Amino acid sequence: MDENCVFCKIVSGQIPSTKIYEDENSLAFLDINPATNGHSLVISKKHYATLLDIPGAELEELILAVQKTGAATMKATKADGFNVLQNNGAVSGQVIHHLHFHIVPRFKNDSLNLSLGGKKAGQAELAEWQKRIKKHLK
């Protein structure tokens, strides 16, 4: 627990939330600033700042909670699809530094734009990044 963390305070009951799923290690609740109807957050009950901090076995359990919550949200909202978003570090848009996944239901013509894309990369550039990244995967 981090005594200054909003999500830790939600887990401990110090701050109220609209819970939609809970198990031993995870908690899902509705976002108070939803991008679309049914937008929720799935968090680890233990405090980990980013995806890089959580042990693999706990991450496996957390992602199953994301999957369950996503499936239930699709059915409840009659969404056409959903995004799972997860940010690491302030520069990526992480506001609360407690590992969390956003489940954002998507509807035809909802006008929410979450598309990614930039300049087209050439084969030489891709090969260089492949080499650099693979070096760190060993």
Image (cartoon, rainbow, N blue to C red):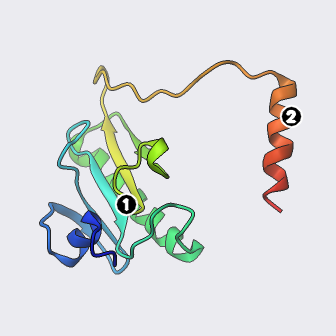
Residue 86 visible from this viewpoint: no
Foreground mark, 1 or 2, reads 2
Q: Does dot 2 land on a helix, a strand or a loop? A: helix
Which residue occupies 54% across, 68% down?
53
Q: In which quarter of the image is the C terminus?
A: bottom right
Secondary structure beneath label 1: helix
Residue 113, image quadrant: top left
Q: Name the residue under label 1.
A: 68
Number of numbered discs overlaid on the protein picture = 2
Q: Is residue 39 above or below residue 54?
A: above
Image check: 67 left or right of 29? right
Q: Which residue is drawn at 14% across and 60% down?
A: 18
* Quadrant the N terminus occupies: bottom left
Residue 88 location in percent, x, y? 49, 52
- Kind of residue at disc 2: Ala
Q: Residue sitting at 29 percent across and 37 percent down?
A: 79
Above or below — where is 104 with respect to 53? above
| In the image: residue 45, left or right of residue 11 | right
> What is the three-letter code of the residue carrying label 1?
Lys
Image position of 22 with respect to 24: above or below: above
Say whether residue 33 is left or right of residue 83.
Answer: left
User: CB atoms at circles 1 and 2 under 8 Å apart?
Assistant: no
Horizontal side of 60 relative to 66 (left or right) equals: right
Read off the residue under disc 2: 127
Q: Which of marks 1 and 2 is nearer the N terminus?
A: 1
Label 2, residues with CA under 10 Å away: few <14, some 14-19, many ≥20: few
Rendering coords of residue 38 (x, y %): 22, 45
Task: Give residue 118's position: percent from left, percent from top.
Answer: 60, 22
